[in-house]
């Protein structure tokens, strides 16, 4: 059994890491599995998702939901992400994250950043995000199982999924102003990022998040993940990278 499992699991490479991050960053919802208090039985439900700037998934849940009480009783959980397309749903990539859920204290710096990023991705959630019985949980990934399609199974650890270093906090400090500027004055560039670098179609694309690895874009119910040519080493690299990507996209177009 051990040898068979080793044959099935591929060595984690850069392509697998990028696919995993794409699935996590692009997700608008996922299947959350928790441990039901009292019975110890598994309980799965659908939740809306976003990501913190370092890549950790975020969920906004009501205290009235069964899965919220379960997370407070036992923070161990898993999150399945990946939307099936046409044809066999099992032929499409998906990732299952094993996590520890952390409820963010309302009003804390961590909560304010998480709420901002969650609402940028899910603007309709503004209708209930401020209600007292809703909380944001950050799901701290410990490991993950990636299925990239038939015969493409990988095991990843936290270091493969979470971005660390000073650039994370540096970028977070100016992220919203950069998003507001791009969405107000440079929608043409955002369209180039979506079409040329993200392979997306359609119009109305806006930027919903910047992080050291790339950017998240949205249009209506669609999402698009675009990676930078190289991860940012410092926040001040964001503007020149965006300018160069726009130039490259226009030249190619």
Image (spheres, rainbow, N blue to C red):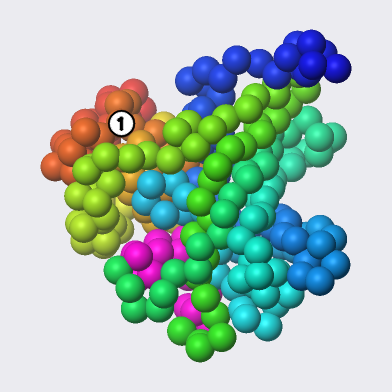
Q: Nearer the viewer, residue 227 or 162?
A: 162
Q: Residue at x 41, y 74 (%)?
A: 105
As drawn, 92 above or below 43: above
Task: Name the magenta segment's main secondary structure.
Answer: helix
Residue 119's quadrant in the figure? bottom left
Q: Is residue 63 visible?
A: yes
Q: Is residue 111 magenta?
A: yes
Q: Residue at x 31, y 52 (%)?
A: 187
Q: Which residue is at the front of the view, 25 or 98? A: 98
**Left of 119 or right of it: where is 85?**
right
Image quarter in which the N terminus is found: top right
When the figure is inspected, residue 125 is found, relative to residue 200, above or below; the finding is below
Residue lying farthest to the front in this orientation: 38
- Percent x, y of residue 77: 66, 55
Q: Residue furthest bottom?
A: 132
Return the residue at label 1.
231
Q: Position of residue 97 (x, y in %)?
A: 62, 44
- Image height of 245 relative to 61, above or below: above
Relative side of 109 to 17, left or right: left
* Residue 124 in view of the camera: no
**Which residue is at a point 45% across and 33% down the rendered structure image?**
159
Residue 76 coordinates in the image, percent (x, y)? 64, 56
Residue drawn at point x = 70 percent, y = 19 percent: 9
User: Which percent across, then down, holds residue 251?
Assistant: 28, 25
Q: Is residue 43 magenta?
A: no
- In the rendered image, the quadrant that contains the C terminus is top left
Q: Which residues are magenta?
A: 110-129
């Amino acid at each position: 059994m051990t040898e068979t499992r080793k044959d099935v699991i591929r060595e984690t490479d850069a392509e697998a890491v990028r696919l995993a991050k794409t699935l996590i960053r692009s997700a608008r919802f996922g299947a959350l599995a928790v441990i039901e208090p009292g019975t110890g039985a598994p309980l799965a439900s659908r939740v809306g998702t976003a990501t913190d700037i370092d890549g950790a998934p975020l969920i906004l849940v009501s205290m009235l939901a069964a899965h919220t009480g379960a997370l407070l009783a036992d923070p161990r959980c898993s999150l399945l992400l990946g939307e099936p397309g046409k044809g066999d749903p099992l032929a499409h990539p998906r990732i299952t994250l094993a996590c520890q859920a952390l409820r963010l204290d309302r009003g804390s710096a961590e909560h304010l950043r998480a709420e901002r990023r969650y609402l940028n991705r899910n603007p309709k959630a503004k209708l209930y995000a401020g209600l007292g019985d809703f909380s944001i949980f950050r799901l701290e990934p410990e490991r993950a199982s990636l299925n990239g399609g038939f015969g493409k199974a990988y095991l990843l650890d936290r270091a493969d999924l979470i971005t660390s270093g000073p650039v994370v906090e540096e970028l977070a400090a100016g992220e919203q102003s950069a998003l507001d500027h791009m969405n107000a004055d440079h929608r043409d560039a955002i369209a180039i990022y979506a079409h040329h670098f993200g392979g997306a179609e359609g119009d109305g694309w806006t930027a919903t998040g910047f992080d050291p690895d790339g950017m998240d874009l949205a249009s209506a119910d669609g999402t698009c993940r675009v990676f930078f040519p190289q991860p940012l080493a410092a926040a001040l690299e964001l503007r020149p990278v965006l300018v160069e990507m726009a130039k490259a996209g226009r030249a190619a177009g």
